[in-house]
Image (spheres, rainbow, N blue to C red):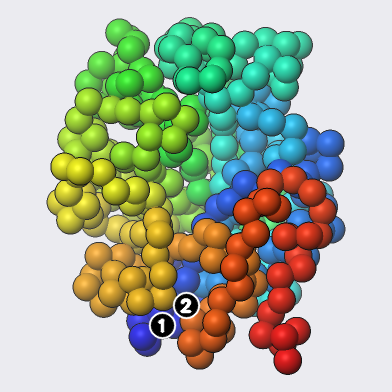
Amino acid sequence: MLGLFAPVDIGPTRLANRIVMAPMSRNRADAGEGAHALTAKYYGQRAGAGLIVTEASPVSPQGRANRAAPGIYAENQIAGWRLVTRAVHARGGRIFLQLWHAGRVSHASVQPEGALPVAPSAIAAQGFAAPHALAAEEISGVVAQFAKSAKNAKEAGFDGVEVHAANGYLIDEFLRDGANRRDDAYGGPVANRARFLFDILEAVESSWDRGRIGVRLSPVNSYNDMRDSDPQRTFGEIAQRLGKRGLAFLHVDESPREGFDWTVFRRRYTGTYIANGGYDREGAATALASGHADLVSFGALYLANPDLVERFRIGAPLNRPDRSTFYGGGERGYTDYPSLEREE
């Protein structure tokens, strides 16, 4: 089991171990604005992770899916996230902010002036209204939202950023042909559909070295009514291009799907690889030992076990996540999960 606890470098950042806290929406922002003292306590409790990737943070009011996610586009939000980075760094942790635009998975009720959510094409996700298809001249404005928020994340003291290109949100909508039916430079062949992602990466690089930028993908996750006609080809090509970029990491949701070969996909990416999706202690150790992954991220297990690294290290029992408290609320199910020290 030593592989889990071995240090590793991602770009210029030294991590104490290979256990990552995955991004998880908690919807506890103040009035849809920023992180706050309780957010700082939550992440500070989990600073034993080699790396924390925060919950998705909207890059603009347009990028919101709801009112309860802590944004990164305004000055007060920078101050709120600075509380978080100071709490994590004080305990020796490392933390990246996840940059997020929800795309079509939003509602006019949370959009500026009641506007429609935006997407690459006017194709509705199940349960949502048809979005506004971004005109070619509007795309650069969305890219600029990522650039500004990446700069804000640096001011807030983060160690790096993760570009959220997964789970059926805006970037993923451009990547997959089930949501992208454009016939311009941002639609059609894989290279065109990936153009939006690479435009954003170039914009983020105006504030961050490539070794401090990660990307999150979910090649076969159908969340938010997503699909692609040939995910093996689509995401294999994207992974290969990302591997040449010298990024901090590629963070992948490995949701199972019949016919998708994860071994083939993994070989296409030559950089640092974070595996995510239903891993436990033993499965993570196996993934590291086999060379499939360089790090492994944990979601609900980290939510419920602030000292997950130590529990894994000594083989201690794990707290069970309380799903009724995952989204919204206060301390219950957020900062009150017991650590080993509090159990003694």
Image label count: 2
Of 232 and 78, the residue lying toward us: 232
Q: Is residue 23 above or below residue 232?
A: below
Image mark for residue 6? 1
Image marks 1 and 2: residues in contact by CB distance under 8 Å: yes
| Image quadrant assignment for residue 10 | bottom left
- Residue occupying the point 62% across, 77% down: 307
Of 308 and 266, the residue lying toward us: 308
Q: Is residue 303 above or below residue 181?
A: below
- Residue occupying the point 41% across, 31% down: 172
**Can the viewer see residue 249 in this picture?**
no
Image mark for residue 317? none
Q: Position of residue 73 (x, y in %)?
A: 71, 35
- Residue occupying the point 32% across, 28% down: 227
Q: CA distance from mark 1 to mark 2?
A: 5 Å
* Tag 2 secondary structure: loop
**Can the viewer see residue 252 in this picture?**
yes
Query: The N terminus appears in which quarter of the rendering?
Result: bottom left
Q: Amino acid at mark 2?
A: Asn
**For residue 200, side relative to residue 285 (left or right):** right
Q: Earlier in the sequence, mark 1 or mark 2?
A: 1
Q: Residues within 10 Å of mark 1 (few under 14, many from 20)?
A: few
Of 306 and 267, the residue lying toward us: 306
Q: From the image, tell me which residue sits under label 2.
A: 17
Q: Position of residue 197 (x, y in %)?
A: 41, 32
Q: Is residue 118 above or below residue 78?
A: above
Query: The C terminus appears in which quarter of the rendering?
Result: bottom right
- Residue occupying the point 40% across, 59% down: 278
Q: Position of residue 226 (x, y in %)?
A: 38, 28
Q: Amino acid at mark 1?
A: Ala
